[in-house]
Image (cartoon, grey):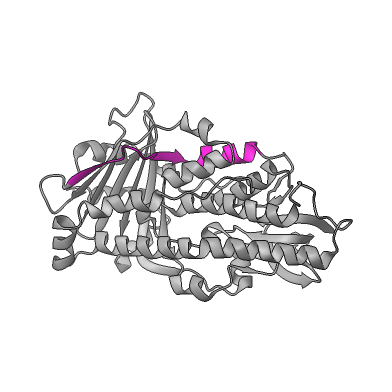
Amino acid sequence: MEIVEDIVIVGAGIAGLTTSLGLHRLGIRSLVLESSDRLRITGFALSTWNNAWKALDAIGIGESLRHQHHLTPSILFASTNLDQPVSEISYKGHEVRCLQRRLLLETLANELPSDTIRFSSKVVSIEESGFLKRVHLSDGTILKTKVLIGCDGVNSVVAKWLGFKKPVFTGRLAIRGYTNFKDGHGLGPKFRQFVGKGLRFGFLPCNDEDFHWFLTWTPSTKDEELEDDPVKLKQFVMSKLEDIPNEMKSVVEKTQLDAILSSPLKYRRPWELLWGNISKGNVCVAGDALHPMTPELGQGGCAALEDGVVLARCIAEALLKPGGEETNGKIVDEEEEYRRIEIGLKIFAQKRRWRSIDLISTSYMVGYIQQNNGTIINFLRDNLLSRFLPRMLLIKGDFDCGKLKY
């Protein structure tokens, strides 16, 4: 069976759904392919900064999500090598919240027409077909499309087609958990982060009942067997909490086993984005397919939201005339339309290339400093960089992707 669609987006994650909703707001239909049989709610929660909320406002869902997530007033940054907290940085003047991934994806999906997302649709190959792309699915379906957008994560089929290598393992792992306190956690709205001894802990309240936490570390060979066993994962985290306040230990203790997961931390080498094809003809990538990064800046999901707004705007500029009239086959020929799409995606690539390189590089370096257990780095981090590193979160989050309408 062969189906023709104007725009096909591979992946119903943050970048894919944001791009689709942005296009929908501009009156342009897209089809989103998701390999799973439902929305994938992995990761539990994500930090969102000024840049994310500007993007969410641009697509019209910021206000509804604000009502369900508390504003974070500050970050408490502490070293487990010292007896007292090193610093507390105020977030005054910045919009910082811990956003539940499930609510974000469901809100995005619910704003789209019901036939936008096609579940159980795994892309297996892509091929040229004149000015179109032919997308082959695992069930035998073939889609023809004018625009193909890869938002299919770190193992992106579309990124591979564009010539990108697989993201590189940093040598570090992350364990993430999510705890619900039915009667309220009573721990306040602050973001707490603890570093030292090669470990980095974070505790982020989403609201009065829900708490997100994480641990990143460099594993030994024996730690690798933890990855698929939530019982061992929880035991491992508890064994590393000896220098953490008891109130934070209780957050981990009360986490259900089905709310704990582990994953390797991967990133794309920045120089690949410097020389690589973010777009090629009528194909491009966004989100983790474009810029997989380590989590130290909390910018992976935020950058995906930025991508979606910018990409929707660039595609609209290519497909719509100034008066809003679609450039379908009756108005311009296929070659002219292809050329306009190609230019639009090149503009997207230009706008996102250096932003992506900056976030990937800075995240990696901040992670290296925070988790390094060497004597010199420990001294510099705890005594000279203790206020600078938390402020870096605000600096990189202070970005405006612009309005949706061009």
| Left or right of 183 on screen, residue 66 | right
- For the point 30% across and 47% down, the residue is 202
Residue 227: percent from left, percent from top: 40, 58
Q: Is residue 88 magenta?
A: yes
Question: Quarter-wise, where is residue 27 in the image?
Answer: top right
- For the point 48% across and 53% down, the residue is 303
- For the point 74% across and 67% down, the residue is 339
Residue 296: percent from left, percent from top: 35, 55
| Left or right of 68 on screen, residue 3 | right
The residue furthest front is 322
| Left or right of 390 on screen, residue 111 | right
Residue 215: percent from left, percent from top: 32, 52
Which segment is the magenta one? 87-111
Quadrant showing the N terminus: bottom right
* Closer to us: 40 or 132: 132
* Closer to us: 211 or 282: 282
Q: Is residue 87 visible?
A: yes
Residue 139: percent from left, percent from top: 75, 59
* Closer to us: 6 or 176: 6
The residue furthest top is 183
Question: Quarter-wise, where is residue 69 in the image?
Answer: top left
